[in-house]
Amino acid sequence: MKERVFTVKNKAGIHCRPSSVILNAINKEFPYHTFCVVTGDGQETELNSILTLISLGLTVGTKATLKVEGPDEEKALQRIGDLFENEFDFPPR
């Protein structure tokens, strides 16, 4: 299992649209991996739906730990961790 600390940079936090992008990447690119997020207060949640991700209440500046387990952990950790730190701009300009 690999871990990475990330900081949410999206001004509106991780709401519906960023959650959708993150979960779609997990499901399409890393179907044989397990992802969990551990918040600063110790709440650990497996990323298996948009609702579980939104329920974490990750706002701008929040630091949390992403954990991944699977056949290509390093690549998965980098890709999904980068999405958590992405500054989403919807709609794209």
Image: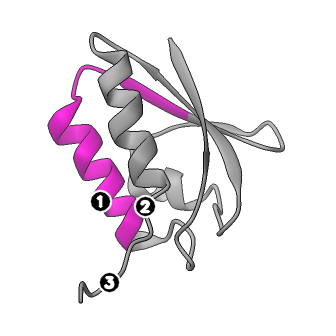
In the rendered structure, the answer to whether residue 43 lies left or right of residue 68 reads right
Tell me the CA gap for discs 3 and 2. 12 Å
Asked if residue 43 shows in the view, the reply is yes
Q: Nearer the viewer, mark 3 or mark 1?
A: 3
Kind of residue at badge 3: Phe
Position in image of residue 42 (x %, y %)? 80, 36
Q: Quadrant of residue 6?
A: top right
Position in image of residue 12 (x %, y %)? 56, 79
Label 2 close to label 1 by CB (< 8 Å):
yes
Decide: few, some or many residues near mark 3? Use Cα within 10 Å; few <14, some 14-19, many ≥20.
few
State the residue position of label 2: 86
Disc sitting over residue 90 in the figure: 3
Q: Residue at x 52, y 65 (%)?
A: 14
In the rendered structure, the answer to whether residue 33 lies left or right of residue 67 reads left
Q: Nearer the viewer, mark 2 or mark 1?
A: 2
Viewer-nearest residue: 15 or 92? 92
Asked if residue 26 is among those painted magenta in the image, a careful observer would answer yes
Position in image of residue 55 (x %, y %)? 60, 59
Kind of residue at badge 2: Asn
Local SS, label 3: loop
In magenta, the rendered stretch is: 17-36
Label 3 close to label 2 by CB (< 8 Å):
no
- Secondary structure mostly seen in magenta is helix
Local SS, label 2: loop
State the residue position of label 1: 21
